[in-house]
Amino acid sequence: MKEFLEGSHAIAEIVKSCQPGVISAYPITPQTHIVEDLAQMVSSGELKSQFVNVESEHSAASVVLGGSATGVRVYTATSSQGLFYMQEVVFNIAGMRLPVVMTCANRAISAPINIWNDQQDSISLRDAGWFQIYAEDNQEAVDFHLIAYRLAEDKRVLLPVMVCMDGFILTHGMETVDMPEQDKVNKFLPSYKPLYKLDTADPMSMGLLADPDYYMETRFAIQETMRESIGYLSEISKEFNNVFGRDYKDLLVEEYQVKDAEKVIVAMGSVCGTIKEVVDEQRAKGKKVGLLRIISYRPFPYARIYEALKDVPKVAVLDKSVSLGAYAPIAVEIKSTFFGKKKGPKVISSFVGGLGGRDITLETIHEVFRRLTVKEVNFDFVDLKPELLKEEYGE
Amino acid sequence: MENSPLFKCGHTACAGCGQAVAARLVIEASGANTIIANSTGCLEVFSTKYPETAWGVPWIHSLFENSAAVASGIEAALIYLGKKDTTNVIAQGGDGSTGDIGLQAISGMLERGHDILYVCYDNEAYMNTGVQRSGLTPFDTNTTTSPAGGLSSGNLRPKKPVPEICAAHGIPYVATASAGFPQDLTRKVKKAISIKGPKYIQVHVPCPLGWRHESNQMLPVAKMAVETGLYPLFEYEFGVLSARKQIAPKPVEEYLKMQGRFKHLLNNPTEIKKVQDVADNNIKKYNLKLEAQAPGV
């Protein structure tokens, strides 16, 4: 049913449809509206769930870890510093193969403190063993939560999933969203039946010490599951399309006017809506430009991206995060996709923009296309303010 | 001792480990219908080295500081599943994971009112990492990070009063216990699990390696800590002191001389007097002296 909803409310509604038995969260802007709405649903009896108000994100993640280990579907949401504060639990959840689902309302990292959107928070946790899927709009954000539970709880997978949605832009944006009906949700997402759980009827120990004779295979196993999951994402998205009448190709990437394009921007998240507008405008003028939108950042779909971009002469990667002291995170992945390959772009330029919520405007995108020439840009910021960059030292 | 089906022999604890004895008493008192969330530390390491486990109950280890929060999630899940009334939940860890790095998570667990028993095995330093001082290391203790030297008599501060911090939350039950008094520990665990809500028990557990005493001296050392007044055994109910074990106080020197960690104090009457003051304050505060007219334990 189509409804005009705030992004956060839409997420709360879809989480309610997934019926997690334990919800735990600690408030942080811009995640708050999601968990406020869930608290209200639990309070009114609309959602039968244990809502655990904790004293920190570290405990929020630990509570859902404990709930999941006891065999119950769980949910948490956070952002920015909150995600960092729960970082060691985040890694722990993946290592213990617990199918936790989390919303990350993407936000900049302190210092300086800044509550606005970029993607430095989740990108910094890319090595944690979680799936990271990035929504472009609130329809996707809603759908991805359903897919997240289905994927996480798949017995071939058993890994946590982080659904990333740009803070404020999506969480606080009002959009028309086709909300999945409960009967269809039940069809697509059966109730959770854990393979392993803490149960006095069948005692088991979890979280054991693995010495050098055993540790490395646990990491190998997650890496293998991630690799195989590229296929599961395609498979699950087709099933999702059948039940809900959507048109997701594979949930790895979206190709927008890429086929015959001479210049393509690679990006992730809500900024892709802006890029599509510029692509449409340029195409109308006969310019062969396109967009490759990354949906699944972990696992990173190298083969799929290779196929999509191998005949594109010039590619610009627009990161909304930065790896200080190194090349930009997505740019590095795109370059490594093509390293040593016969085919591929002659130029892969890297731009970083939109940090700390600075608007990426239509003009920003035009500028990226303009700067995408035969001269490769290894790394540069866009939309910097030169007047703020004058160095002043004391006497 | 016979093998226990809930905490099996064959684990790799040091000989004379007070924590191993106490942990076994705790789970035997709580019984098979118990789920344990265990912090990182000696107990976790020596009982669950993959592919083996000593535990005959469902048991989970996540991290150093979050067992109270993991247990909160377990408890919430059990309520959701309708199994809470038939299942005890225990969170447990050492003094470092309890009183230092995990204190916030424990406070959260107590404040939220979860039906969980938290057990702190207090061996008074970070033993698993090599005897570094914790917030629960006693005054004047020689540890690897509070070494006695020309300018120092060891740990500069008295023990952090974690039982009182827990009691200040107004929770139904707080108790201290000792590996030296097994029946008392068993009774307190049974009492705790019979009460709905958050409970805290802190058990004094000698560590022969860190305290530097012979393995066969675990029980006498534990008993002497109680008998000198340095480790008072008491119970708080809803924030009010309700019982304590009364003693005929022995001089603290009797306790200090049993352990290498206090060896540097033995020819230093000034410092011994300071430790005696700690015991005397406990004796006064908890009214521990046998002749006092009050209900004993």
Image (spheres, coloured by chain):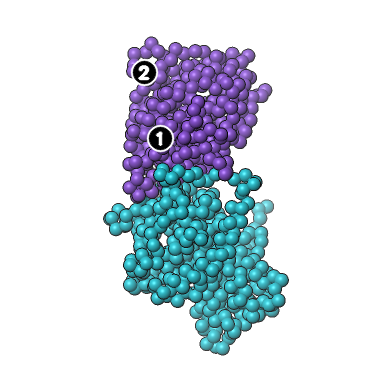
Chain colours: A cyan, B purple
| Position of residue B191 measured from the top left corner of the image (x, y, whole percent) | 36, 29
Amino acid under label 1? Gly
Numbered circle sitting on residue B31 = 1
* In this rendering, position of residue B225 left or right of residue B293: right
Q: Residue B195, how many percent across, how many down? A: 33, 34
Q: Position of residue A264 (x, y in %)?
A: 59, 78
Furthest residue toward top: B291
Whether residue A194 is situated above or below residue B256 in the rendered picture? below
Q: Is residue B225 visible?
A: no
A297 lies above or below B171: below
Of the residues shown, which amino acid type is indicated by label 2? Gly
Task: State the quadrant of the N terminus of chain A.
Answer: bottom left
Pick whichever, B161 or A215, lies toward us.
A215
Observer able to see residue A192: yes
Q: Which marked residue is nearer to the observer: mark 1 or mark 2?
A: 1
What residue sits right under mark 2 in the picture? B296
Residue drawn where x is 49% and y is 13% of the image: B250
Q: Residue at x 68, y 77 (%)?
A: A343
From mark 1 to mark 2, how far is it between C-alphas?
27 Å
* Secondary-structure class at tag 1: loop
Q: How many marks?
A: 2
Left or right of B134 in this view: B109: left
Question: Residue under mark 2: which chain is it in?
Answer: B
The lab-note entry on whether marks 1 and 2 share a chain reads yes
Q: Residue furthest left?
A: A44
Residue drawn where x is 68% and y is 52% of the image: A395
Residue A26's disc is none
